[in-house]
Amino acid sequence: MAGLSISKASLVVILGLLGNITTGLVYLAPVKTFWRIVVNRSTEEFESAPYMFKLLNAYFWVYYGIIKPNSILVATVNGFGAVLEIIFVSLFLIFVPPRLRVKTAILAGVLDVVFPGAVVVAAQLLLKEEKRIDVAGFFCVCFSMAAYGSPLSAMKTVITSKSVEYMPFLLSFFLFINGGVWTFYAIITNDWFIGLPNGTGFGLGTAQLILYAIYYKRPQPWKKSSNKLEEECLIPENQRITAKD
């Protein structure tokens, strides 16, 4: 990479590859949810909007990675993410209840086809290279911050319920690792379009892991035997004797 020493260039590549792995794991996190949707042939109470915004976010990171010099690693993993999100959104359109299908299709068309297409075409036709990078970076920051901010509701639930049941540990852990890797990458490459949202994600991931440490409760094996004992106490005496005989 031009302007970088050999050791620094190698570190950038290593961090970029690690960031690709962790970002890929974050993109893969909803697979279990969509397997459930396919098996049940229904989207149930799941919302489609978060996945549409994640697809929109992936589009802009791909565009940013393509037009920003030496940022191909940013484009590759988000290209992978965009393919996954297209599959997820398509599954929503297939299995969403008929009364919501038209509304969902319109939202997907506007957010994931018309809007990004219009921005990219306008940027290519009207802006010079540096301005294109700034515009793409701006949209990347906006949509990444929105994506990283989504766990805030889950964190509120953890605090109010004093339970981590509805905040999956692996997703929190991967957000923490992913945010940290890309923040370090941004510091080395002096790319604050990458650093700002991922630094925020690293902070939120840290906060989620702290909440886990505070509110995680180990399973209590004695509860099962206690419940069994309570059930036995409800069985009439003569039936218990018969069962033993």
Image (cartoon, rainbow, N blue to C red):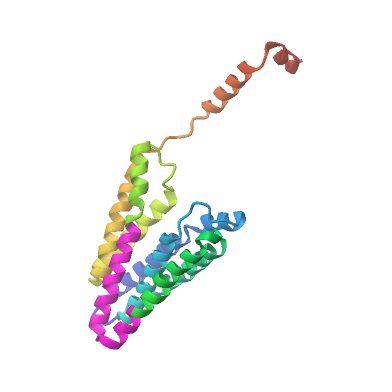
Q: Is residue 70 above or below residue 237?
A: below
**Residue 114 visible, this angle:** yes
Q: Nearer the viewer, residue 161 or 195?
A: 161
Specify whether residue 197 is painted magenta. Answer: no
Q: Is residue 143 above or below residue 215?
A: below
Q: Quadrant of the N terminus?
A: bottom left
Give the x, y percent position of residue 118: 35, 80
Specify whether residue 141 is painted magenta. Answer: yes
Q: Answer with left or right where residue 124 lies relative to residue 242.
A: left
What residue sits 39% from the left and 65% below the top?
A: 53
Give the x, y percent position of residue 230: 58, 20
What residue sits 43% from the left and 73% below the top?
A: 79
Give the x, y percent position of residue 113: 42, 75
What residue sits 41% from the left and 41% below the top?
A: 164
Q: Nearer the viewer, residue 59 or 202?
A: 59
What residue sits 35% from the left and 55% below the top?
A: 150
Q: Quadrant of the C terminus?
A: top right
Q: Residue furthest bottom?
A: 125
Q: Is residue 210 above or below residue 108?
A: above
Give the x, y percent position of residue 13: 35, 72
Most frequent secondary structure within the magenta stretch: helix
Q: Nearer the viewer, residue 150 or 229?
A: 150
Please tell me how many numbered marks the rendered image carries. 0
**Residue 214 visible, this angle:** no
Q: Which residues are magenta?
A: 119-148
Q: Answer with left or right where residue 89 lies relative to residue 75.
A: right
